[in-house]
Image: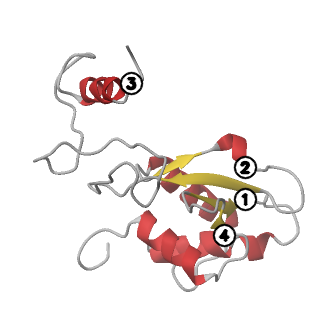
Amino acid sequence: MAEGGPRRLRPWLLAQLQSGRYPGLQWDDAARTALRIPWAHGGRSGQYKVGACRQAWAEYKGRLRPGDPPDPAGWKTRLRCALARSPEFQALPGRGRSDGPCPYRVYRVLPARGELREPGGDRAGHRELRAQPGGDGDWGHTGNGVGGDGIWGRTWKWVQSIGGVT
């Protein structure tokens, strides 16, 4: 862990995106709500250029130290698992490309944990679930069923409030 807390994927990945260091790591849309991550197969040429971002993630997390043998497949697995576990990214499988000269995966960037967004803010047209007032930004798991105070109850109430269910 880094001083001051864990080393998180979201700030690191967005910093790499802004730096322009890694070819193919780019925004997928003009609104900057989704990003493309190069996802070439290990046996294809150019893999090591594409794998540089994955290698950097392994170094950042302390999983790759000087003198360790190269492990592109392991680096790819670590990044894939980190993205799958992160509550701040959502895979968009229909928008990626698995074949061709430059395959990539697309991930939506969700609000940071505890971040509050108002509809019509910097992401106009998107309505998002927001943390409950007075909470710590976490939806929690109290209550059961659709009518309770847990995540399903609050989600149901939110859907009703935007006119999604009558």
Front position among marks 3 and 1: 3
Q: Which residue is mark 3?
A: 163
Q: Which percent across, then down, holds residue 108?
A: 54, 52
| Residue in the image at 34% along x and 41% along y | 129
Q: Few, some or many C-alpha atoms within 10 Å of disc 2 (few <14, some 14-19, many ≥20)?
A: some
Front position among marks 3 and 2: 3
Q: Which residue is mark 2?
A: 96
Amino acid marked by disc 4: Leu
Q: How far is the residue under mark 3 from the one under mark 2? A: 31 Å
Q: Few, some or many C-alpha atoms within 10 Å of disc 3 (few <14, some 14-19, many ≥20)?
A: few
Q: Which percent across, then down, holds residue 56?
A: 57, 76
Q: How far is the residue under mark 4 from the one under mark 3? A: 37 Å
Q: Is 30 left, or right, of 86 in this rendering?
A: right
Amino acid marked by disc 1: Trp
Q: Quadrant of residue 149?
A: top left
Q: Is residue 5 above or below residue 108?
A: below
Of residues 43 and 13, the one drawn nearer to the viewer in this rendering: 13
Of residues 62 and 149, the one drawn nearer to the viewer in this rendering: 149
Front position among marks 4 and 3: 3
Of callouts 4 and 3, the N-terminal one: 4
Amino acid marked by disc 2: Gly
Q: Are marks 2 and 4 in contact (CB under 8 Å)?
A: no
Q: Which residue is mark 4?
A: 25
Q: Are marks 4 and 3 in contact (CB under 8 Å)?
A: no
Q: Are marks 3 and 2 in contact (CB under 8 Å)?
A: no
Q: Quadrant of the C terminus?
A: top left
Front position among marks 4 and 1: 4
| Residue in the image at 42% along x and 70% along y | 11
Q: Which residue is mark 1?
A: 39
Let me know if residue 64 appears in the view.
no
Q: How far is the residue under mark 2 from the one under mark 4? A: 13 Å
